């Protein structure tokens, strides 16, 4: 099991459990999306289309594949390595 340390501290006396869970979920989704953007940008023929400053990007990742010969199912081992 992978442990992620989030750069956030919560004043527990002022935060509800629900708000803490929501914040942690947002940070995890953002971190996963950032990793996906980085991995996609290294693939030949793939252009990541997300614009804006990284701190303003969300969990949606948009990209275009320009290489017709690139198959997303050719080597699934790379997907497993990325996903952990």
Image (spheres, rainbow, N blue to C red):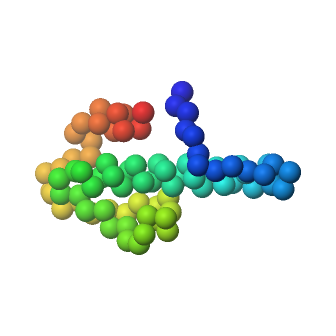
Count of marks overlaid on the render: 0
The answer to which quarter of the image holds residue 6 is top right
| Residue shown at 18% from the left, 62% from the top | 66
Image quadrant for the N terminus?
A: top right
Q: Residue 35: where, in percent of width, then height? A: 40, 49
Q: Vertical placement of 59 versus 49: above or below?
A: above
- Is residue 76 in sight in this rendering? no
Q: Vertical placement of 16 versus 73: above or below?
A: below
Q: Which residue lies furthest to the bottom in this view?
A: 52
| 10 sits left or right of 32 in the view | right
Q: Residue 30: where, in percent of width, then height? A: 51, 55
Q: Residue furthest right?
A: 13
Q: Vertical placement of 76 versus 27: above or below?
A: above
Q: Which residue lies furthest to the top in this view?
A: 1
In depth, the one of 72 and 32 nearer the eye is: 32
- Is residue 56 in sight in this rendering? yes
In depth, the one of 45 and 21 nearer the eye is: 21
Q: Residue 58: where, in percent of width, then height? A: 50, 63
The answer to which quarter of the image holds residue 73 is top left
| Residue shown at 66% from the left, 54% from the top | 23
| 44 sits left or right of 21 in the view | left
Image quadrant for the C terminus?
A: top left
| Residue shown at 29% from the left, 32% from the top | 77
In depth, the one of 68 and 43 nearer the eye is: 43
Q: Residue 20: where, in percent of width, then height? A: 73, 51
């Amino acid at each position: 099991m992978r442990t992620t340390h989030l750069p956030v501290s919560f004043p527990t006396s002022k935060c509800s459990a629900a708000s803490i869970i929501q914040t942690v979920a947002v940070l995890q989704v953002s971190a996963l999306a950032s990793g996906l953007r980085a991995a996609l940008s290294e693939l030949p023929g793939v252009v990541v289309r997300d614009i804006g400053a990284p701190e303003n990007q969300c969990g949606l990742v948009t990209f275009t594949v320009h290489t017709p010969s690139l198959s997303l199912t050719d080597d699934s081992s790379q997907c497993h390595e990325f996903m952990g």
